[in-house]
Image: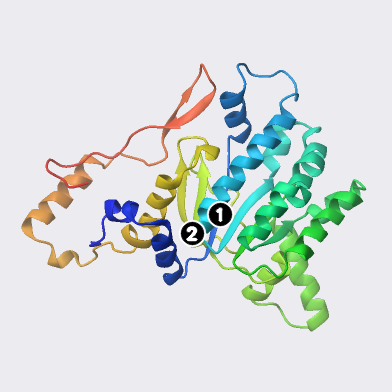
Amino acid sequence: MTTKSIEWFQSLSTSQVAEIVRERELGTVVFAAGGTKRWFILNHLDHWPSDRSYWDGYLEHGGKQFLKITRLFFEHGVPELLTHAVIPSQLAGEGERYLPLALTSGMERIAASPEFLAFYDECGVRVRFFGNYRQVLQDLDYTDALAMFDEVEERTCKNDRHVLWWGFNSEQDQLTPIIKLAAQYYQEHKVMPDQDQIVELYYGEAISPVDIYISFNKPRAWVLPPLIGDRADLYFTVGLSFDFAQRQLRSILYDHLYARRGVHRDYAALSPESFSATQEFYRLNQEAVIGVGHHYEAAHFWYPLPQVRFPSGWNS
């Protein structure tokens, strides 16, 4: 059991937390934001729009909020942050007009707007893109947008404090491109690439394995980045992703660095009281399932149901 408490961790200064995070050599953190359009509409409009008239306001306010949250991660010592600009479910749910919007005004904002460029420079952020964005942009003849992505990567290539990865995947199938890269490598070198080499082929350079994955709503790992996410600790916010704040981040960092690392495993050394409490805990929770939830029909959203029950006197 850890001797450090969550209250202690929450009370630290930001620089103290950042020092701990760096000392523990935290790897990549994924912030797979969800409900971002919902966040803008609920916070900035008085009704649900029937068209995309909200889009410019969404980009403006959503962009500012994303940078605020990204700064929070970096100030707390996170070295590499990976997020998603486009995922297949967005394209399926938003319709065929969404992709041109995401590729032009959406992604161009993160690649070329003065607000984002100033943030990259101020925080020493190197920007990287991965996924099938290049092929999609070429197929749609969006050469200007592609040039912007190349330019921001070149502009920030010497920034060395943080890395911000932008993922773009318009296809559900991410395995086939990886197989093709491995096959191409074999044809050129007459030897199969190892995992590190495949990672570099897919992402364009080495990237740290994912240590923390943060998403929203239903617990599922379907947008975990390929090849690097198999050891991640998974976290899912009940509130909207763009309401993410310092206490949530510190709760997650504490859980990853201390609570999950400090689990007592010497069951033979349990005191009689601890043995009885353990029996009672599992008896109370033998039918509990983390991830079971309820669909709220009136507003068409899912939320998790409380599951864990504690023995009397349990120090939770």
Would residue 235 appear left or right of 36 to someone viewing this image? left
**Viewer-nearest of labels 2 and 1?**
1
Residue 168 appearing in the image:
no
Task: Residue 286 in the image: state x and y as whole percent.
Answer: 26, 42
Q: CA distance from mark 2 to mark 1?
A: 9 Å
Q: In the image, what residue type sits under mark 2? A: Ala
- Mark 2 falls on what kind of element? loop
Which residue is found at the position 16% from the left and 45% from the top?
Answer: 314
What's the image's color scheme? rainbow
In depth, the one of 110 and 288 nearer the eye is 110
Tell me the residue that label 2 is attached to: 232
In depth, the one of 270 and 122 nearer the eye is 122
Q: In the image, what residue type sits under mark 1? A: Val
Residue 5 vs 296, above or below: the answer is: below
Q: Which mark is drawn over residue 252?
A: none
Would residue 185 appear left or right of 13 to someone viewing this image? right
**Is the residue marked by circle 1 packed among few (<14), some (14-19), or many (20+) residues within 10 Å?**
many
Residue 200 appearing in the image:
yes
Which residue is found at the position 89% from the left and 47% from the top?
Answer: 142
Task: Residue 276 in the image: state x and y as whole percent.
Answer: 10, 51
Which residue is found at the position 54% from the left and 49% from the top?
Answer: 221
**Is the residue marked by circle 2 packed among few (<14), some (14-19), or many (20+) residues within 10 Å?**
many
Q: Quadrant of residue 291?
A: top left
Residue 10 vs 271, above or below: the answer is: above
Q: Quadrant of residue 308?
A: top left
Mark before the other along the chain sequence, 2 or 1: 1
- Mark 1 falls on what kind of element? strand
In depth, the one of 184 and 133 nearer the eye is 133
Tell me the residue that label 1 is attached to: 30
Task: Residue 25 in the image: state x and y as whole percent.
Answer: 46, 70
